[in-house]
Image: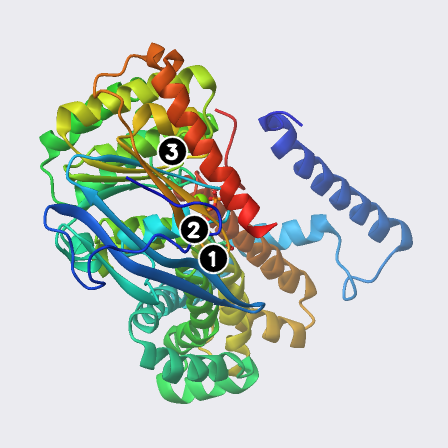
Amino acid sequence: MQNAKPGDRPLSDPLSQDMTTPGAVISARGLSLTFQTNDGPVHALKDVSLDIKKGEFVSFIGPSGCGKTTFLRCMADLEHPTGGSITVNGVSAQEARKARAYGYVFQAAGLYPWRTIGGNIRLPLEIMGYSKADQAERVARVLELVELAGFEKKFPWQLSGGMQQRASIARALAFDADILLMDEPFGALDEIVRDHLNEQLLALWARTGKTIAFVTHSIPEAVYLSTKIVVMSPRPGRISDVIDSPLPKERPLEIRDTPEFIEIAHRVRDGLRAGHGYDD
Amino acid sequence: MNGQPSLVLRIGLPLGFGIAVLVLWELFVVTFDIPRAILPAPSEIWAAIQRSTEILWVDWVQTVLKGALTGLVIGAVAGFAAALAIDRVDFLRRGLLPVANFVAALPIVGVAPIMVMWFGFDWQSKAAVVVVMVFFPILVNTLAGLAATDRMQRDLMRTYSANHTQTLGKLRLPAAMPFIFNGLKISATLALIGAIVAEYFGSPTKGMGFRISTEVGRLGIDMVWAEIAVSALTGTVLYGFVVLIERWVTFWHPSQRRSR
Ligand SMILES: Nc1ncnc2c1ncn2[C@@H]1O[C@H](COP(=O)(O)OP(=O)(O)OP(=O)(O)O)[C@@H](O)[C@H]1O
Ligand SMILES: [Mg+2]
């Protein structure tokens, strides 16, 4: 467990820069990404190193613009790092993407308006060549999971924003990928639905043993869900703290009132404050 | 604001206006005793239509069915295919697009006589003129449509590691449809104009353009107006037909959505 104090250098890797940890599903080493914009370079990520082990639930939390989405997109091979390296399942991010190693939930739902909700969830299944019967069965199952059963034939624009977001989660769960990359999937949902989906997600994670990388702005959500919380700070985007959660795997919602939970939440909050203080 | 106006209002209103215009027109011609050669009354035009149904039908088949529609279908398919090719192969984008642009700038009065020399006096040369006229609008609109997806929609396909054909069929073509239909609506109008005007530069002794030009010479102005009426009606129906298919295909687009 490492804890960077404000003003510390970015978390540096104890191992050599080009070695990946055996057993790590996602392994970033000195990862940097600089966007060249008209207003000059933007350092979205700078020298980020992190290992995510199989079956871990890792949350990323940090102020807006600190590079959480960018980091997730690097794991998904949607963004090309300008420095360092990243491996997924022991191979390059590109090879992992080609092997359909992960499901990605974007920050916005991004459903195709010409397809029904069922059709949108079927999209990856069609592309990956699942049989018709299998498709129907999976669509029904994940719709049930996100409580959208009965909305299969509706079009996205006929649903509320939160329902669309749930459909997009169902879409990422429909096919068998061992990794789930989720970018603020519950940001648009009300507290009650959010609690419920948090529980559902934990149950799904326990049942399937998926490795999950999860971006959120909510401290309680991060603490409740994760086995590991990664606190990030902006300009340049880097990791300021990594907190391994001592909470048990079995987590009823009431766990949020226990002292352990509150203590971790405090530490996350301190980490976030420190990240802010570094700049101002 | 909410919902769509009733069917009666949507069809009745323009129909009422149309009839009002015709009535005023009739009154105007009769009251001021306008010479027939200047402006015939609607009743006279109607009489000419009834008198010459046979001729009008033959002209319509020649110009609309054979010239305009054949040309429209060939031109649209060719423009669409060219757009797919240009989209796939970057070197075509740089080579073919400027050429298509150049061809689109050719004036119809220059193209039509050349097509007559190449394809003869009959409808084939008129269809060829129409092909040249509609090719470019379809091409450009399809290309714009294929580029109209947003980043997240494309990224999604990337996360599935979808190949070119899958991305085309499941994302880019559906997204392009509103653009393609814009091209088709422009082309439907152009096709009719092209087929009629092309007949001025040589045609067999039938066709709407041929009829208009010869009847003007013989001062058969009511017949000229009869042909104009037929072509206006055809244009409206053709356009309406395209709009109908558009509504069916792009029902999901914000401009087409009905409250369900
Ligand atoms: N395609 C891009 N081109 C230029 N700059 C970009 C691009 N994508 C992201 N950035 C910049 O990189 C930085 C990190 O962006 P990123 O989207 O990763 O932040 P984030 O942590 O996900 O923020 P939020 O919580 O608001 O979603 C920001 O300063 C952003 O402006
Ligand atoms: Mg983000």
Mark identifier at residue A67: 2
Residue B31 x %, y %? 89, 49
Asked whether B27 or A14 is in front, the reply is: A14
| Mark 3 → mark 2, Cα distance in angstroms | 16 Å
Look at the image and tell me in which quarter the N terminus of chain A lies.
top left
For the question of whether residue B120 can be seen, the reply is no
Q: Are marks 1 and 3 in contact (CB under 8 Å)?
A: no
- Residue that appears at 47% across and 29% down: A188
Chain label for disc 2: A
Name the image quarter holding residue A122.
Answer: top left
- Residue that appears at 69% across and 34% down: B13
From this view, report whether residue A253 is shown above or below residue B163: above
Say which label, 1 or 3, has the lower sequence index. 3
Q: Name the residue under label 3.
A: A185
| Mark 1 → mark 3, Cα distance in angstroms | 24 Å
- Residue that appears at 48% across and 24% down: B260
Residue A91 x %, y %? 13, 57
Asked whether B158 or A233 is in front, the reply is: A233
Name the image quarter holding residue B38.
Answer: bottom right
Chain label for disc 3: A
Q: Are marks 1 and 2 in contact (CB under 8 Å)?
A: yes
Camera-side mark, 1 or 2: 1
Q: Is residue A276 left or right of residue B135?
A: right
Camera-side mark, 3 or 2: 2
Chain label for disc 1: A
Q: Name the residue under label 1.
A: A236
**Are tags 1 and 2 found on a single chain?**
yes
Say which label, 1 or 2, has the lower sequence index. 2
